[in-house]
Image (spheres, rainbow, N blue to C red):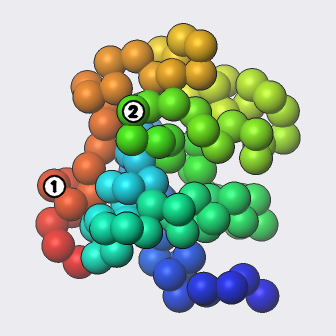
């Protein structure tokens, strides 16, 4: 069983809503869920998400667009390849035009 199951489930519910070809950050998800300082906890949820195949964890990056969670995927380039398949340009583990592809759940979904 997952620790922090309810929070993790809330994170997964938000991540499932990230549109194809868009990304968000750990902090943006934490902020949306009312836990502004909870970015690290969102990261833990993403690290545990491999047990749920329907979580597009590759769409969650750090606040400046770095693929900071890439080492939690099956291969060293899996996260980057999944993003590129969605039309997102990644150079040296960083999303290019980050602000253009950034999806903020607080703006897009409103308050929970």
| Quadrant in the rendering for residue 58 | top right
Estimate how packed mark 2 is, as few (under 14), some (14 to 19) or many (20 or more) residues with alpha carbons within 10 Å. few
Please state, as top left, top right, bottom left or bottom right, where the C terminus lies in the image: bottom left
Gap in angstroms between the C-alphas marked 1 and 2: 18 Å
The residue located at (77%, 66%) in the rendering is: 51
Above-or-below relation of 26 to 95: below
Q: Which mark is residue 64?
A: 2
For residue 85, side relative to residue 38 (left or right): right
The residue located at (46%, 77%) in the rendering is: 10
For residue 33, side relative to residue 48 (left or right): left
Q: Nearer the viewer, mark 1 or mark 2?
A: 2
Q: Residue furthest front?
A: 37
Callout 1: SS: helix
Q: Is residue 100 at least partly visible in the picture?
A: yes
Estimate how packed mark 1 is, as few (under 14), some (14 to 19) or many (20 or more) residues with alpha carbons within 10 Å. few
For residue 78, side relative to residue 98 (left or right): right
Residue 87 % position (x, y): 47, 20
Query: Foreground: 66 or 60?
Result: 66
Above-or-below relation of 16 to 4: above
The residue located at (29%, 76%) in the rendering is: 34
The residue carrying mark 1 is 107
């Amino acid at each position: 069983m997952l620790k922090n199951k309810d929070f993790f489930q809330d994170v997964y519910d938000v991540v499932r809503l990230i549109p194809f070809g868009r990304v968000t950050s750990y902090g943006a998800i934490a902020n949306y869920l009312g836990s502004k300082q909870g970015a690290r906890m969102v990261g833990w949820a993403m690290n545990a998400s491999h047990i749920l195949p329907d979580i597009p964890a590759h769409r969650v990056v750090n606040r400046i667009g770095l693929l900071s969670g890439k080492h939690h995927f099956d291969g060293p380039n899996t996260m980057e390849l999944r993003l590129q398949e969605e039309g997102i340009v990644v150079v040296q583990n960083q999303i290019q035009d980050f602000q253009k592809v950034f999806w903020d759940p607080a703006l897009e979904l409103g308050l929970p």
